[in-house]
Image: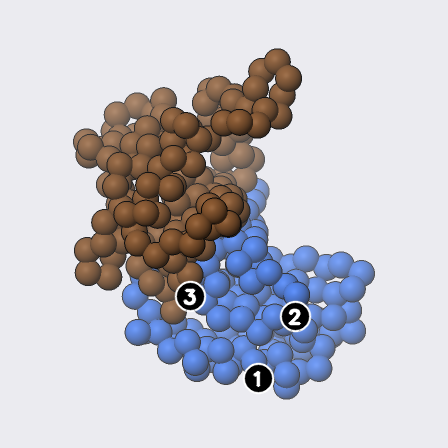
Chain colours: A blue, B brown
């Protein structure tokens, strides 16, 4: 079984330890929330579906426009960043960061978080309803 | 249905138009992103439906849930699908449906899976049973089965 508590703890630390990170959620490729550390008043279920759909669209764009394997999808707004990263075949990680975040540092921290999460996800049985 | 949102045409629209919407979404967004969006939309619809059903009388038995959902979604309701029965086998809840809007008009052997129909049943069950569920379309009328079967298990 997947260790939800450990994953939740990683996400929680990630958000609380790094000042410019505002939220993080890990979702299944079919759009169901696995674990979250999101700001209050955010609809976890909606964000999960949106995250999986966005990455899927990103992958489709990558294919159609011959950009190869998609590493991440980034949405930059005036108030900050939303970064979507494939986190093994079984999960997608969404990170929310404020506008002050330094991109290089942000991506390095995301890479570290992914490296911590991937071994825990390897224990998860595949349950993708869309395949 | 007692309420009508359109003066001349009433509440219902052709499945042909719905299929065109889905085909257009799949063309623009891809099958997977479309499926995710339609399942999410179905779950939201199912949740709202369940809230309206619960407001009549709280429910605990699967039989009662099945009866209420069958009426709300079937011939005398929104005509999304027919629910024949809901059974529990161990930890799995199986919902036997037919004439789903998702499978309608599809050729036999089509690989199409139910999305909005699955999501609607999923959202309604989650709300009525008060549990987070993982849903899956396991048997299809398009692949020789008698029903479109949706299976649900508890989600952590």
Pointer 3 local density, CA inside 10 Å: few below 14, some 14–19, many at least 20: some
Percent position of residue A70, x then y = 52, 56
**Residue ID for mark 3:** A88
Tell whether label 1 touches label 2 (CB within 8 Å).
no
For the point 52% across and 22% down, the residue is B12
Percent position of residue A75, x then y = 68, 57
Under circle 1, the secondary element is: helix
Residue at the extreme front: B57
User: For the residues tagged 2 and 1, is the chain the same?
Assistant: yes
Q: Nearer the viewer, mark 3 or mark 2?
A: 2
Under circle 3, the secondary element is: loop
Left or right: A5, with A95 as reference point: left
- Position of the C terminus of chain B, as image quadrant, is bottom left
Left or right: B26, with A78 as reference point: left
Distance from disc 2 to disc 1, alpha carbons, whole Å, reads 17 Å
Earlier sequence position, callout 2 versus callout 1: 1
**Residue ID for mark 2:** A40
Distance from disc 3 to disc 2, alpha carbons, whole Å, reads 27 Å
In front of the other: B83 or A46: B83
Q: Which mark is residue A13?
A: 1
Q: Is residue A23 above or below residue B36?
A: below
Q: Which mark is residue A127?
A: none
Percent position of residue B65, x then y = 35, 48
């Amino acid at each position: 079984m997947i260790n939800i508590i450990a994953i939740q703890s990683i996400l929680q630390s990630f958000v609380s330890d790094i000042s410019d990170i505002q939220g993080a959620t890990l979702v299944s490729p079919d759009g169901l929330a696995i674990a979250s550390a999101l700001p209050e008043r955010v609809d976890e279920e909606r964000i999960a579906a949106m995250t999986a759909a966005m990455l899927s669209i990103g992958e489709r764009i990558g294919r159609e426009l011959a950009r190869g394997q998609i590493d991440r999808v980034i949405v930059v707004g005036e108030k900050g960043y939303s970064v979507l990263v494939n986190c093994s075949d079984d999960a997608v990680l969404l990170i929310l960061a404020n506008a002050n975040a330094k991109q290089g540092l942000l991506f390095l921290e995301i890479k570290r978080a992914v490296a911590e999460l991937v071994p825990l996800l390897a224990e998860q049985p595949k349950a993708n309803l869309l395949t | 249905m007692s309420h009508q949102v359109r003066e001349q045409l009433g509440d219902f629209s052709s499945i042909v138009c719905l299929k065109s919407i889905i085909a257009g979404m799949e063309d623009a967004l891809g099958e997977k992103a479309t499926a995710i969006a339609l399942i999410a939309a179905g779950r939201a619809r199912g949740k709202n439906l369940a809230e309206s059903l619960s407001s009549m009388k709280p429910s605990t038995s699967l039989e009662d849930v099945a009866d209420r959902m069958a009426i709300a979604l079937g011939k005398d309701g929104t005509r999304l699908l027919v629910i024949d029965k809901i059974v529990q086998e161990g930890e799995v809840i199986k919902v036997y449906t037919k004439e789903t809007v998702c499978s309608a008009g599809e050729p036999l052997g089509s690989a199409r899976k139910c999305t909005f129909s699955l999501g609607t049943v999923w959202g309604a069950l989650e709300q009525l049973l008060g549990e987070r569920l993982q849903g899956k379309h396991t048997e299809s009328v398009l692949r020789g089965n008698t029903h479109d079967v949706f299976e649900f298990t508890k989600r952590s």
